[in-house]
Amino acid sequence: MISTPDRHRWPLWAAVAALAVAASAVGADRSVADQRLAEGRAALARGDGIAAEAALRKALAAGAPREAVAARMGEALLDQGDYAHAREWLGPTRFAPAEAAHGWRMLGRLEMAQHDLPASAAAFARALALAPGDSRLWVDIARLRYVSGQELAAPDAVAEALRLDPGNVRALELRGLMVRDQYGLTAALPWLEAGLKRRPDDLPLLGEYAATLGELGRAREMLVVTRQMIRLDPRQGQAWFLQATLAARAGRFALARQLLARAGPDALDIPAALLLSGLLEGEAGNANLAVERLDRLVRLQPHNEVARRLLARALAATGNPALVIARFGDEVRVPGTSPYLLTLVARAYEDSGRRDLAAPLLDRAAAAGAGEPSAMPEPTPLGVLALRYGDAPSDAGAAVPYVRQLLATGDRGGADSVAERIVAAAPASATAQALAGDVRLLRGDLAGAVEGYRRAGAVRLSDDLMLRLVEAYVRTGQGGAARQLVGGMLATSPRNRTALRLAAGFTAEEGNWRLAAQVLRWLRQTGDARDARLLADLAAAEARIGNAAAAREAAVAAFRLQRAAPTATRALGELVDDAARVAALKARSGSF
């Protein structure tokens, strides 16, 4: 007998079947969501924020919870520079438990990118509590310390990152950059190369490696690396910028402009590219465009002395002395203004018929000594800086500009007090240490100046800091330490112009005038043709080795550039005296 189904039980079986189909569909959706999440993480690992965002949005559409996606989506948007939308995902801090440490780390990076450093520190602290063994987090902490005025503590964080993961490419890169700042270019190469062994297609690392090779003068190797970067991603502009820099150094300015144009308009958002563009436009005779680029850079980086010097030169090249006076006339009243800027503004006053205002500036330019601390302009009024310092007296970021402004207004006593206070409160701040060195040098505490400069140089031995430290060493009778410092810099950065200049001086003191002349000639030929002091030194060296015509030419050039400078007048005077003595000897011997 054929049985028939129980009609009363059919709804139950249908419900069970429907649930099974639904469960299967949910499982499929979860599988798709998990797959898209994995794709998003992979895209982030290779630095493709756009692809990561697309994959993560597909994961959301497939049913992934917002909390499971938030940290990675915030990272994808952060990598694209979309800070506003990144904050929508990271700001609420609603992360799945497995994603919480990563989410807090991304929030810390976002706050650091938007210059809220206390908020960044707080977010990193939350991440560290959840994941103390995350090597990537320690790299971020090192970067925060570096930008927040705790530079001397940054290397410890990088060391911890490498202890946790010796193959962390970002840690190797950051360690290489720190070594480059502290010990020079050659010392950085092994760290950068170690990172490239692990990830040979890493564009940021390739960029730093190429830049270091270029600074070392290894042009062919640099070109190989930049061409590899272009093959990996023709859209990125760093390789074109580096090639433009190389062409500019070779004096091929037209080619450099073409290469920089290929970097795209976004390249001009980078300070180094703005600087190069301003230089190239000036060389091409486009003074107004050079002014526009360099003025923008100086507003972004008011303490960039190279940019300020190029801006002053570009303003002078417009043929309108009023522009030079309007831009720098107030600044040159401040003690410690560079001789170059003093001279340019003085010439502008002369061209405007105001010789009464030009003469004092030329006198100050002539009397300025090498190695003396220069005034650093602060666009913020003194009263505002005082209030900021009062609100955060242990914050180097608030104290340093306040001290600079106090020095600019001649209040050395106030500057001294604040500088010593901030060094005690923030001993890990290299900027505060260097500033304390300046204040101590001004008050005659040479040993204290050496200590401040040395501690600052343990993080980054800039050219300006090297000059001041050498000056302090020499004035304290530590000439050997000064020579060792310069020699160490040249051992790792053989094309460092400041170190070469100092080395030429030491070589001359030791009686090797021929080598000193060779170095000074090279410096003149490669960019220092308008440096009156260098020309005067070159004149002396040429005279010592018997090159009378070359000595006379260099001395006259120095005198024409800076007639009131003691070094220029002395060089020309010595040559005149020598010529007179030779003429007298010839007259007595009857030889004409």
Image: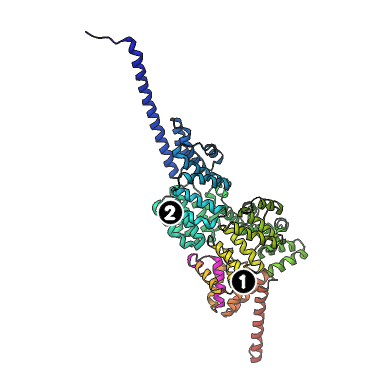
Label 2: element kind: helix
Residue 210 visible to the viewer: no
Residue 19, disc: none
Which residue matches tag 2?
162
Where residue 479 sits in the image (x, y, percent)? Answer: 56, 74
The answer to which of marks 2 and 1 sits earlier in the sequence is: 2
Q: Residue furthest top?
A: 1
**Residue 30 as seen in the image, left or right of residue 570:** left
Q: Is residue 500 magenta?
A: yes
Q: Residue furthest left?
A: 1
- Which mark is in front, 2 or 1? 2
Where residue 299 sits in the image (x, y, percent)? Answer: 64, 52
Q: Does 563 appear above or below 576? A: above
Amino acid type indicated by mark 1:
Leu
Where residue 493 sits in the image (x, y, percent)? Answer: 50, 64
Mark 1 packing: few (<14 Cα in 10 Å), some, or many (20+)?
many
**Residue 16 as seen in the image, left or right of residue 540:** left
Residue 535, disc: 1
Q: Which residues are magenta?
A: 489-510
Label 1: element kind: helix
Q: Nearer the viewer, residue 90 or 313?
A: 90
State the colouring used for the structure image.
rainbow
Q: Nearer the viewer, residue 4 or 43?
A: 4
- Quadrant location, the N terminus: top left
Q: Does 581 appear above or below 126? A: below
Residue visible at 56% across and 76% down? 508
User: Mark 2 and 1 residues: CB-CB less than 8 Å, in contact?
Assistant: no
Residue visible at 51% across and 55% down? 154
Where residue 565 sits in the image (x, y, percent)? Answer: 68, 71
Amino acid type indicated by mark 2:
Leu
